[in-house]
Image (spheres, grey):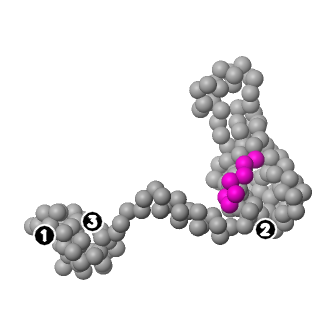
Amino acid sequence: EILEERVKRGNPGARTIINNLGLKYSAKTVHKVIKRHGLTQKHKTRYKKRKDMQAVKAAYKPMQKIQLDYKYYCDIANQHEALKKGAIPRYEITARDYRTGMVFLGFTDYKDTLSSSIFADYVIDYLTGLGFSTNDIAIQTDNGMEFVDPLYNDQTMFEKTLAKRGVKHL
């Protein structure tokens, strides 16, 4: 019954199996049965996870997938004083290539679609200058208001800029 429950329910733990079947065995005993029949799963080590991620990234071509995001400078303690004086901008925009790790940086005082679209336009111009086709580039973002409009589902300036340049938005 333990083995059938383990396979049928998608590998639940020993305590879950005991609760589901109403067994009077200890969790240690149930785990021994699972282990004896080779139904345990090994946890991936950090090294193994990193190797798996490297294989995923290797499947992409350079500049095929770019992650774009904002960083708040008010979160960084040693830059907070300069931010209060107005000596530095409030936000950093980063665009990171998924395959190579290449990073593009932009700075702005506004977290809006205009700033996002201007930055994306600069990045796309740079990449096309290097010979990359805009049809092969995809920019991935979160669903922040600086990229998309979740309230009205209207196309933002950022999305219009990507569409005009032929870049996919994920």
Residue 41 percent across, percent down from the top left: 34, 69
Q: Gap in Å between the C-alphas at discs 3 and 2?
A: 44 Å
The quarter holding residue 19 reads bottom left
Q: Nearer the viewer, residue 120 or 34?
A: 34
Q: Decide if residue 84 is in sight here.
A: yes
Residue that mark 3 sits on = 13
Observer-side mark, 1 or 3, equals 3
Q: Secondary structure at mark 1?
A: loop
Q: Is residue 104 left or right of residue 40?
A: right
Q: Secondary structure at mark 3?
A: loop
Q: Nearer the viewer, residue 142 or 148?
A: 142
Residue that mark 2 sits on = 136
First of labels 3, 2 by sequence position: 3
143 within the magenta span = no
Observer-side mark, 2 or 1, equals 2
- Bounds of the magenta segment: 98-104
Q: Secondary structure at mark 2?
A: helix
- Residue at the (87%, 58%) spot, across then down: 130
